């Protein structure tokens, strides 16, 4: 038996006025996904337990079958594991976004986050900026590491996770930052570093070139997602099968590394609609030659939700349908039996531009045991089946046929 999880990050949504009061899943033309849904178990699953923040970290750990209440230590440490940072027990890791803040001469606290990803800055440009940040602030108590695009990492040696509210920047796009800065005394040195980074980066040659080219500057670091060294159980020890991961983002690759899963790198894979969809599908099939399960993750729907791009979110779903599903299904036919689990990790509603904790629709298809499903899968048709899984981490054993 082979198992494939197709994780469409942030795909679920609320009704969108620009889409005639429908969700992107309702509007998207997705014949391959719907054909699977017609012969699959379809329902809702709560991937974010009550009391937990609806981040991709918690939600994807849940889908992978790791109970966040037991294993979650913070978002950034998982990304640090992907970058290859060997965290000590006394280290604290923080996500370091390169963001665009308004630059009108106003005090730092009165600035507005204009873009949480600085126009999706390239990794090459970002590396130069992070190197400048490291030269200015690193080498002692703090060390900065380059990640991918706008997502980077700070290791605070001997730091604390008691930092108050370190707000994710994608939660406050378009808003004045002051009310969302932590008031905890322990966070003061981090906030001072963020403020100083604005003066350091705003006139950096990389940003001057970006502005001249009509692109937003990455003129500030934004620190959040603090956590200690993670301690996930190996996926194989937990479920008795080998697993692999295909993703463009450090978070998912970090979870996989911590869980002892094989990670396949795909040149040209990004976290947006310009990703190499076909390359990721082929990488998933390659992983299946050496593993029992592959988790192939697509970030694009989530990014479109954060950016308030309803048409592109529809397009992202359609691209997964037309450029991924046919390759996977054709490649899987060589196996006597296989299962496909397709779902979002959480909703990323266009109208709020941030994550939500609502239950998400899923389909679970098995080649040798088709079921009567729904004609088209979306938030409403999945709810109408009456099938509901309250405990997200129970989905993986259910998928694998290892229900208690």
Image: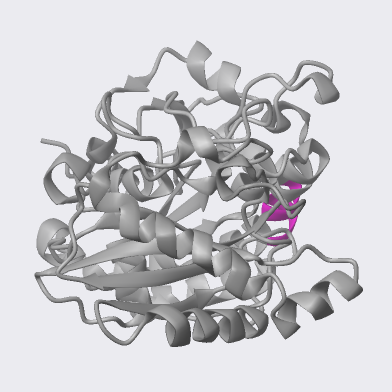
Magenta segment range?
318-323
Residue 46 visible in rendering:
yes
Nearer to the camera, 244 or 402: 244
Residue 231 horizontal/vertical position (percent):
13, 63
Residue 259 visible in rendering:
no
Question: Residue 59 colored magenta?
Answer: no
What is the quadrant of residue 44 in the picture? top left
Position above or below: 279 against 376: below
Residue 182 horizontal/vertical position (percent):
37, 41
x 68%, y 76%: residue = 122
Q: Please identify the quadrant where the N terminus is shown.
A: bottom left
Residue 33 horizontal/vertical position (percent):
63, 42
Residue furthest right in the image: 213
Residue 7 horizontal/vertical position (percent):
49, 50
What is the quadrant of residue 282 in the picture? bottom right
Q: How is the image coloured?
A: one colour
Q: Please identify the quadrant where the C terminus is shown.
A: top left
Q: How many marks?
A: 0
Nearer to the camera, 169 or 252: 169
- Lateral position of residue 325 relative to residue 400, left or right: right
x 63%, y 22%: residue = 14
Prevailing secondary structure of the magenta residues? helix
- Lateral position of residue 277 relative to residue 259, left or right: right
- Lateral position of residue 30 relative to residue 109, left or right: right
- Lateral position of residue 243 relative to residue 151, left or right: left
């Amino acid at each position: 038996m082979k198992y494939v999880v197709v994780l469409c990050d942030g795909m679920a949504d609320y009704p969108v006025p620009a889409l005639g009061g429908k969700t992107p899943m309702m509007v998207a033309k997705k014949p391959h996904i719907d054909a699977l849904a017609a012969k699959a178990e379809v329902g809702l699953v709560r991937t974010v337990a009550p009391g937990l923040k609806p981040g991709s970290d918690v939600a994807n750990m849940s889908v992978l079958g790791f109970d966040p209440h037991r294993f979650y230590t913070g978002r950034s440490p998982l990304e640090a594991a992907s970058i290859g940072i060997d965290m000590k027990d006394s280290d604290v890791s923080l996500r370091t976004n390169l963001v665009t803040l308004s630059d009108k001469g106003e005090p730092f606290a009165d600035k507005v986050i204009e873009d949480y990803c600085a126009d999706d800055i390239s990794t090459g440009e970002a590396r130069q900026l992070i190197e400048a940040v490291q030269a200015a602030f690193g080498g002692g108590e703090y060390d900065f590491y380059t990640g991918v695009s706008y997502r980077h990492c700070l290791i605070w040696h001997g730091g604390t996770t008691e930092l108050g509210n370190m707000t994710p920047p994608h939660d406050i796009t378009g808003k004045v930052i002051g009310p969302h800065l932590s008031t905890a005394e322990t966070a003061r040195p981090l906030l001072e570093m963020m403020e100083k980074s604005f003066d350091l980066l705003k006139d950096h040659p990389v940003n001057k070139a970006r502005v001249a080219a009509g692109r937003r500057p990455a003129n500030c670091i934004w620190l959040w997602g603090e956590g200690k060294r993670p301690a996930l159980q190996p996926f194989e020890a937990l479920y008795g099968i080998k697993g692999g991961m295909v993703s463009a983002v450090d978070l998912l690759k970090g979870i996989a590394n911590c869980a002892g899963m094989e990670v396949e790198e795909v040149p040209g894979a990004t976290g947006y609609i310009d990703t190499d969809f076909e390359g990721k599908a082929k990488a998933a099939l390659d992983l299946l030659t050496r593993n029992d399960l592959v988790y192939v993750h697509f970030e694009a729907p989530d990014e479109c939700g954060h950016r308030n791009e309803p048409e592109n979110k529809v397009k992202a779903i359609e691209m997964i349908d037309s450029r991924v599903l046919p390759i996977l299904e054709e490649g899987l036919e060589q196996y006597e039996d296989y299962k496909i689990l397709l779902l979002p990790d959480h909703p990323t509603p266009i109208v709020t531009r941030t994550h939500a904790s609502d239950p998400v629709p899923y389909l679970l298809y098995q080649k040798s045991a088709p079921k009567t499903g729904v004609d088209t899968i979306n938030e409403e048709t999945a709810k109408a089946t009456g099938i509901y899984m309250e405990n997200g981490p129970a989905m993986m054993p259910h998928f694998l046929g290892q229900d208690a």
